[in-house]
Amino acid sequence: MIGERPSSGADAGAAEAGELARARAGDVAAFGALVRRHQERVFRFLHRMLDAREEAMELSQDVFVKAWQALPGWRPEAAFSTWLLQIARNAALDQLRRRQVVRFAPLEEGLEVADEAPGPEARYATRERQAQLERALRRLAAEHREILLLREVEGLAYGELASVLGIAEGTVKSRLARARSALLEHFDPHTGACHE
């Protein structure tokens, strides 16, 4: 509408910067706003890494408690969202080590591809292809699965991946290439077939 100003990424960034400054000064309400802004992304990542909704919910809370406790030591040159995902990643890997099981969480039920009014056959084929992809992802090592999730699902840039994973950017590129190659050993993206 005329006269309305669309919200921009800069506005959101400025709002978050203000909330971060207030939260670092001990403002619980400002930290609550940060939690609301980032909780879905953190939960989604943890749920996919752990394949357990309740466990991911509990661990999400733990991530934000750890973030609150560590907030005074947070370096503003690091993106807050990247820092949170690094805490979430460490928590997920610790949980997987405690379990001694590495599994992949299925994506949300009913996830549909943006098609022009797909019919039942197309929806079934999409669900079947998604299930095949999930089976292939379950077969990957945790380090391959996590880098694929962070890059392809969460959309992190190479620099952000390096920060979250604690590795050099060149290592990010080579690990991502190895992860994609490992996935292709188990999944054909053209046919959607999962190789046993």
Image: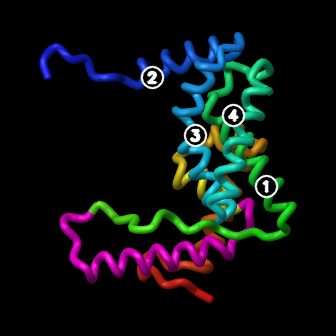
Circle 1 sits on which residue?
A: 93
What residue did someone put label 4 on?
A: 83
- The mark that comes first in sequence, 4 or 3, is 3
Point out the image quarter for the N terminus: top left
Is residue 26 toward the left or the right of residue 185 in the image? right
Determine whether the residue tagged by mark 2 lies in a helix, strand or loop: helix
Badge 3 element: helix
Q: How crowded is mark 4: few (under 14 residues within 10 Å), some or many (20 or more)?
A: some
Q: Is 90 situated above or below 129? A: above
* Residue 30: quadrant of the picture: top right
Of marks 4 and 2, which one's residue comes earlier in the chain? 2
Nearer the viewer's eye, disc 4 or disc 3? 3
Q: In this view, does 128 lie above or below 145?
A: below
Magenta part, dominant SS: helix
Measured Cα–Cα span from mark 2 to mark 1: 31 Å
In the visual, does 152 lie left or right of 141?
Answer: left
Left or right side of 106 for 90 = right
Amino acid type at mark 1: Leu
Residue type marked 4: Trp
> Where does the magenta region start and end?
115-143
Mark 3 neighbour class, 10 Å CA radius: few under 14, some 14 to 19, many 20 or more: some
Q: Mark 2 points at which residue?
A: 12
Q: Position of residue 122 (x, y in %)?
A: 28, 78
The verdict on residue 129 being magenta is yes
Q: In which quarter of the image is the C terminus?
A: bottom right
Q: Residue at x 60, y 76 (%)?
A: 136
Question: In the drawing, what numbered circle is on residue 30?
Answer: none
